[in-house]
Amino acid sequence: MAPGIPAAMERPHFIGIGGAGMSGIAKILAQRGAKVAGSDAKESGTAEALRALGATVHIGHAAGHLADDASCVVVSSAIRADNPELLRAAELSVPVVHRSDALASLMGGLRAIAVAGTHGKTTTTSMLAVALTELNLDPSYAIGGDLAGPGTNAAHGEGTVFVAEADESDRSFQKYDPEVAIVLNVELDHHANYASMDEIYESFEVFAGKIVPGGTLVIAADQEGAVELTERARALPSLNVVTYGESETADVRVHRITPRGLTSEVTVILNGKYLTFTVSVPGRHYALNAVAALAAGVALGIPAHNLASALGKYTGVKRRLQLKGEAAGVQVIDSYAHHPTEMTADLEAMRGAASEARLLVVFQPHLFSRTQELGTEMGRALALADASVVLDIYPAREDPIPGITSDLIIDAARSAGADVTAVHDKAAVPGTIAGMAKPGDLVLTMGAGDVTELGPQILDHLSS
């Protein structure tokens, strides 16, 4: 039987309850029987799903939304200090709890697997959640995206395992004490919080040091940042380190990845034996994510053969190369990729899955700070497409930075020989793409902002 509700979480109020991370915690608490309330900037399917679980969800932020008897207020790092509900919490002396602390309290008493890395966290966490559910282990899970099958980003299970996406962006993953942790890669990102790779390494090293004594760190053997972290992790006491990847020195060695259309066949060498299984999503990076999930499950004591078969049941996460539909012979696919490494991986995956198709990309940069640091690399990644449309920067939680615009990306893309069009009015994109696309083309909407809304609109224009 999974643990119940921590006392501080009996009547939580979430500011920004519709966010990917916040909504998952709220859903689990509601399923455990807590009296959940919260607010969000706009109405959404997530808000409706929370209401269906018994939560009270207000639209807009106002001091009056916070009930006098709230046991705590849950916030993420994106919530500003002048939020009226946060100010009201101070007046009422209601404790304020960071999202990561709330999630850590839900993991208490369970065998936790925490999935970290600059890229691939949502996919790998999802793969584990699906596979463990397929094996009737009834896990709890909290993910940064909705699973294509169950259609949700979180669930309370009656089993003993809790799988969670561990966010490094604000160092909040240092709050967890997992039995098994995965580090997929270590790269410089989240420039508002990290000034250098040294700070990134230090943060990940703290995360690895939080693994319970005798626990396991599963870490990539092929990625430069992960290799550096591995050397540091091996010096930590009472920690098992298991490497995975294509390196000959990897503990779980990838022998072969064979693309088969929109799937891959993966063969690994584990404990001296060959094991072959199917990954039901396209792309080499997703195949490697599945190998990381396999290694983590084995570290938890799950038979490798059973787990490998169950991993084949994973069919994707919303916004991770998700097919939105087809019209006029054109397929429209949605990608959450917003870092150059992710962009390159998804574009190469699409090239591999449909080598004869023309690839058109609608890219929306995410965050001014990320564009300032990585705009040139983003532009170079777009050179993998046949043609691209680039939107203005999606600010999310950030204020503008003088001189930082999408032009940084566009100039870099054109210097790399890419065919790029700047579109400043998002509403004009569907018509622009419909005018460019021909039967047989693939259209990829890409970015972590609201570019995802354009997929259905593009399909409508193609159909008309």
Image (spheres, grey):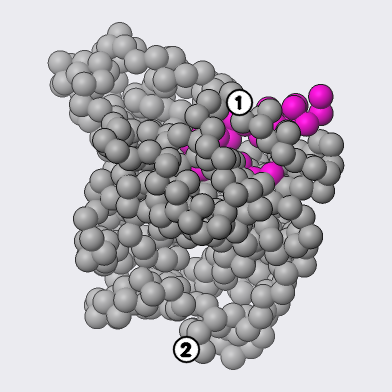
Measuring from the top left, give residue 208's x and y in whole percent.
30, 66
Q: Which residue is mark 1?
A: 428
Mark 2 packing: few (<14 Cα in 10 Å), some, or many (20+)? Answer: few
Q: Give the mark, 2 or 1, whose residue is nearer the N terminus.
A: 2
Quadrant holding the C terminus: top right
Measuring from the top left, give residue 206's x and y in whole percent.
24, 63
Q: Which mark, residue 249?
A: 2
**Furthest-top residue in this view:** 64
Q: Is residue 455 magenta?
A: yes
The quarter holding residue 86 reads top left
Looking at numbered disc 1 in the image, what kind of residue is underneath it?
Answer: Ala
Looking at numbered disc 2 in the image, what kind of residue is underneath it?
Answer: Thr
Give the residue at x 20% y 26%: 81
The answer to whether residue 118 is above or below residue 397 is below
Q: From this viewpoint, is residue 125 visible?
A: no
Give the residue at x 31% y 73%: 229
The answer to whether residue 224 is above or below residue 83 is below
Q: Is residue 350 magenta?
A: no
The answer to whether residue 154 is above or below residue 190 is above
